[in-house]
Amino acid sequence: SLAPTPSASAAVPRPLGACRRRGLAASGRPGCEVPGSSGEKEQHLVGTRRRGSRCRSARESRDDGNEASTAGEANARRIAIVGAGFAGVATAYHVFRQLADAHAEATADGNDRMVAPVRVTLIDEKRVAGGASGVAAGLLHPYTPRGKIIWRGTEGVAATLELVEAAENAERAMEATAMEATAERDEVNGEEKKKTRPTVSPRENRGRAIARRAGVCRPARSLKQARDLAKHAPASFEAGGRGVTVSAEELRRLIPGMDVPPEVLEATKKRPSRRSLEDDDDDDDASLLARPLTRADRKAASAKRLREKNAPVTSALHIPEGLVLDTTRYLASLWDAARLLASSGETPEGCSATMEIRTVASIAGDSALNEPGAYDAVVIACGAAAGSVQELQGDVLPTQLQGGHVVELVPVFSDGNENVGCWPDDAPGVLGSPYIAPLGPERLLVGTTKEYGASVADARRAGEVPLGNIEDDEKEDAPRAPTPKPTDRVTNSRLEIASRASAAARELVASASAAYPPLALENGAWRVDVVRYGVRANPPRSNLGSLPLVGRISAASDDAVDAKTSEKKNWWYVGGLGARGLVYHGMLGAIVAAAALSGDDARVPPELRFDPGARRTVDE
């Protein structure tokens, strides 16, 4: 056991209304000074001020480096997290968030109980958000395509919003610190103080901010979906969602230029009479029944159509509290938040958060993970690439891998340097197949294709796909890539990958243009800037829906029992986030952090509990 640990309640986020909004204190808030600022008030980086603690500035932490006190270093617990995507980074942050809570409780009112520090190592073969998490749309909301609330969806959104706040505050704090350091260097060199925004860490600032808070919207793309959205909206509102149905006119005011399918538009304008339904009875059921229609058959069929055609219909579901995240920038800043929290006075002396860029082929076979006393817990959180770890290969995981491409569109600039296309500042993101996620008014993320049968190797090549000019490919006389020689396997593979990406980009833009015509490339307002590829691990469906998986990993030599100590190994798997990683990763991070700190399976809710190696019972 790794006791003392946070209370059990720390593992399960509270509902939206009761959820505490914790995280790094906003650097611009009254009463808070960021590291290196010249204000006289006490500097603090993290959350609510804890009694008896002194927060160390980022500069002090840098000076200290990894040299913790002798006692702290000797007692430090170590946790390795493999995978720097949604689940891995959220787990790292929650380890320190829960440790800070335990430390505050231990030191309250003069209590002398000590909490041992924790040293987290985040391991990834690329970087933070280098896999599918960095390709994700970033559309945060708790709804299904039919307008229902997913399992614990509002709780998941609330937990994610806490992490978004922490990431935003960390970004502000890091940038303010870097700006002061730049100013100090300028003063030493006798140069004028610079006012430019610094680049703190390698990340793509693709939009204006980490989060775009203009809501999201799901337009009905068929009459059935229009009825489903209208049918489920009231119950979803009672369940904690805040989505509201909107008419075609309201949808077009929200997103000027948005298309409304004719059948949806017609259904919202009028309701058929009973007489008109009875007149066209023969058009439907007569062709579906092997026997002649009876009067009762006609009556039942007419009543069914009357219920369907008179059912409520809506043009879209508008979710004003939804937001769009730049997932790459968000995860990089959330990792910064974890590092700042580890070096603050809210956590015990000796805590640290470091990152290693390397691969892990096996937990048991990795020398760094298995040095005597090296790590007290290991968490595998590398998404669709988890199958590359020896202990999870074969039929251990019940997940299905699904690949997909996304495109980023940017406006085309005229000769006068004025952009022809631009997404309205207050227009929401668009849910659907495809979705349109505005990272800013001048960058849209459109996705995704559905490419089943992807492999672990595909998952490990996630990221940007280099390709040619897609607009030129549309021309009939455009030159095509030369046919590779059969012996040139590397070139052949690259050309095939680029060819699939180009085809996916054309498919996505065409599909998105059907819903939002201004995006059509022939209009000359938008162009494809980059194509990305990712693979997600879809979990099996249960009676509660598609839920992520959390469980203890079995050792290769036995059934997860160490022969020397007769204790279960503290190895954990979290995955199967599928299309709902953004909703669930905050909640999962808290759960997995509590499980890794305590070594207790009971910290995992039974709905998510999974024993790698034993297939979950599937409820269709």
Image: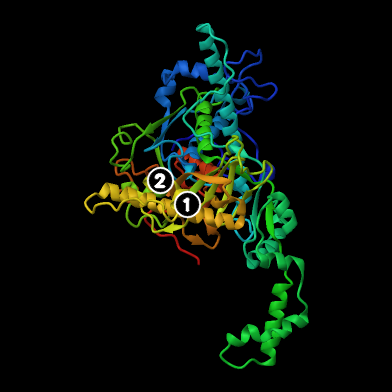
Callout 2 crowding tier (Cα within 10 Å): few <14, some 14–19, many ≥20: some
Residue 460, how many percent across, how many down? 37, 45
Colouring method of the image: rainbow
Residue 472, how many percent across, how many down? 45, 49
Residue 123, labelled with which disc? Answer: none
Number of callouts:
2
* Frontmost residue, 601 versus 26: 26
Q: Is residue 310 visible?
A: yes
Q: Secondary structure at mark 2?
A: loop
Query: Can you say whether 411 is above or below 105 in the image?
Result: below
Q: Is residue 142 visible?
A: no
Q: Secondary structure at mark 1?
A: helix
Identify the amino acid type marked 1. Ala
* Frontmost residue, 169 versus 591: 169
| Residue indicated by mark 1 | 505
Q: Is residue 38 left or right of residue 551?
A: right
| Residue indicated by mark 2 | 467
User: Between marks 1 and 2, how big is the CA–CA gap?
Assistant: 10 Å
Which of the two discs, 1 and 2, labels the residue nearer the N terminus? 2
Query: Can you say whether 203 is above or below 447 in the image?
Result: above
Residue plotted at (70% across, 51% down): 242
Q: Is residue 30 left or right of residue 403?
A: right
Question: In terms of image quadrants, where is residue 394?
Answer: bottom left
Question: In terms of image quadrants, where is residue 28?
Answer: top right
Residue 43, how many percent across, how many down? 61, 18
* Frontmost residue, 304 versus 556: 304
Residue 409, how many percent across, how many down? 54, 45
Q: Are marks 1 and 2 in contact (CB under 8 Å)?
A: yes
Identify the amino acid type marked 2. Leu
Position of the N terminus, as image quadrant, is top left
Callout 1 crowding tier (Cα within 10 Å): few <14, some 14–19, many ≥20: many
